[in-house]
Image (cartoon, grey):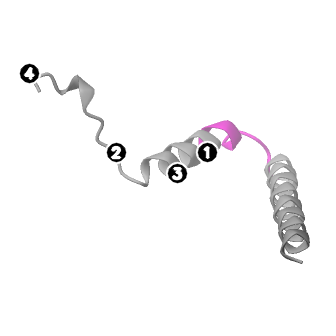
């Protein structure tokens, strides 16, 4: 290197979760509790549905 440290990226494995957590905190921080609960419930149900669907597909491929 020629002394220019702009090419280096120093990051840890916790940078992305840290940023996502704070973005969600800013996005949902001023909302009422019922809105937060509804949003988290919808997101959680989509995550569970996706996990179940992937597990079923994986089970079909194994047989």
Q: Residue at x 89, y 63 (%)?
A: 53
Mark found first going from the N terminus, 2 or 3: 2
Q: Give coordinates of residue 59: x percent, y percent.
A: 87, 74
3 and 1 marks in contact (CB < 8 Å): no
Read off the residue under disc 3.
Answer: 17
Q: Up-down: is 7 above or below 36? A: above
2 and 1 marks in contact (CB < 8 Å): no
Q: Nearer the viewer, mark 4 or mark 3?
A: 4
The alpha-carbon separation of the residues under discs 4 and 1 comes to: 40 Å
Read off the residue under disc 2.
Answer: 11
Mark found first going from the N terminus, 3 or 1: 3
Mark found first going from the N terminus, 4 or 1: 4
Q: Residue at x 86, y 55 (%)?
A: 46
The alpha-carbon separation of the residues under discs 4 and 3 comes to: 33 Å
Read off the residue under disc 1.
Answer: 25
Which SS class for mark 3? helix
Please give the label number shown on residue 40. none
Q: Give coordinates of residue 52: x percent, y percent.
A: 87, 68
Query: Which quadrant: the C terminus?
Result: bottom right
């Amino acid at each position: 290197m020629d002394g220019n440290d702009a090419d280096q990226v120093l990051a840890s494995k916790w940078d992305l979760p840290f940023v996502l957590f704070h973005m969600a905190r800013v996005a949902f921080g001023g909302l009422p509790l019922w809105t937060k609960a509804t949003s988290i419930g919808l997101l959680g149900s989509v995550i569970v549905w996706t996990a179940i669907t992937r597990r079923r597909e994986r089970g079909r491929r194994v047989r």
